């Protein structure tokens, strides 16, 4: 019995060491639904449709990726004269690949909260900037030599500096990734 547990531990250890990233340049588009809460100035919560978690980056050493992350979401919620709240952030991220094509990513950068009358119309008078942090856990399946399909969860924190808005958003995203270097 003791040898079986040693063998199982060895298999798990070797699998963890053999976590494989994809070296080279890639681009990922990721969208899905989410929920948000704002706990300071607005004190509201609701749904974020869509939530985004895009990235463009470079994989190296078979376990890491450096990336530029574009994350946020669109909220349909009436605030004063505005009908929409747009959460948008651009930052740098580091992804770590784990066994079975799973990964964890941490990104941080500058965030922007924009209030708008129409979702396509961004107004300068309803904009606040601050910082944003994103953490996500993803699972990917390779569907071709250069293509991956994935699903993941994410959590965002947006905090503005002038007016004290603090948005927290959680969601589930589906992702399509294109690898410029074949992975198979």
Image (spheres, rainbow, N blue to C red):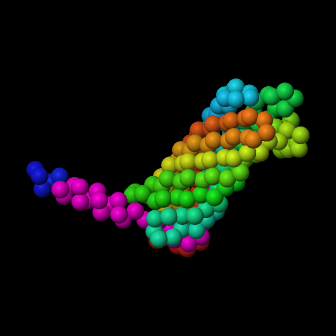
Residue 138, percent from left and from top: 50, 51
Residue at 42% over, 57% down: 98
Task: Tell me, yes or no, whether the highlighted magenta stretch contains residue 25.
Answer: yes
Q: Which residues are magenta?
A: 6-29
Can residue 146 be spotted in the picture?
no
Residue 132, percent from left and from top: 66, 46
Residue at 73% over, 35% down: 165
Residue 97, percent from left and from top: 46, 59
158 relative position to 13: left or right:
right
The vertical placement of 95 against 89, above or below, is below
Residue at 49% over, 53% down: 104
Task: Tell me, yes or no, whether the highlighted magenta stretch contains residue 164.
Answer: no
Residue 26, percent from left and from top: 60, 66
Q: Nearer the viewer, residue 10 or 127?
A: 127
Q: Quadrant of residue 86?
A: top right
The vertical placement of 136 against 44, above or below, is below
Residue at 58% over, 68% down: 58
């Amino acid at each position: 019995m003791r040898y079986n547990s040693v063998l199982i531990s060895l298999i798990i250890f070797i699998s963890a060491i053999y976590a494989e990233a994809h070296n080279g340049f890639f681009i990922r588009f990721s969208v899905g639904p989410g929920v948000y809460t704002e706990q300071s100035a607005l004190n509201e919560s609701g749904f974020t449709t869509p939530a985004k978690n895009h990235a463009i980056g470079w994989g190296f050493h078979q376990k890491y990726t450096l990336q530029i992350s574009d994350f946020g979401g669109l909220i349909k919620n009436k605030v004063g004269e505005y009908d929409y709240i747009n959460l948008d952030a651009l930052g740098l991220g580091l992804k770590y690949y784990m066994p079975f094509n799973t990964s964890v990513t941490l990104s941080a950068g500058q965030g922007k909260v924009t209030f708008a009358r129409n979702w396509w119309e961004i107004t300068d008078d309803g904009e606040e900037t601050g910082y944003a942090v994103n953490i996500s856990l993803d699972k990917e399946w390779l569907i071709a030599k250069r293509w991956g399909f994935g699903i993941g969860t994410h959590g965002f924190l947006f905090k503005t500096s002038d007016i004290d808005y603090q948005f927290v958003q959680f969601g589930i995203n589906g992702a399509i990734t294109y690898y410029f270097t074949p992975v198979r």
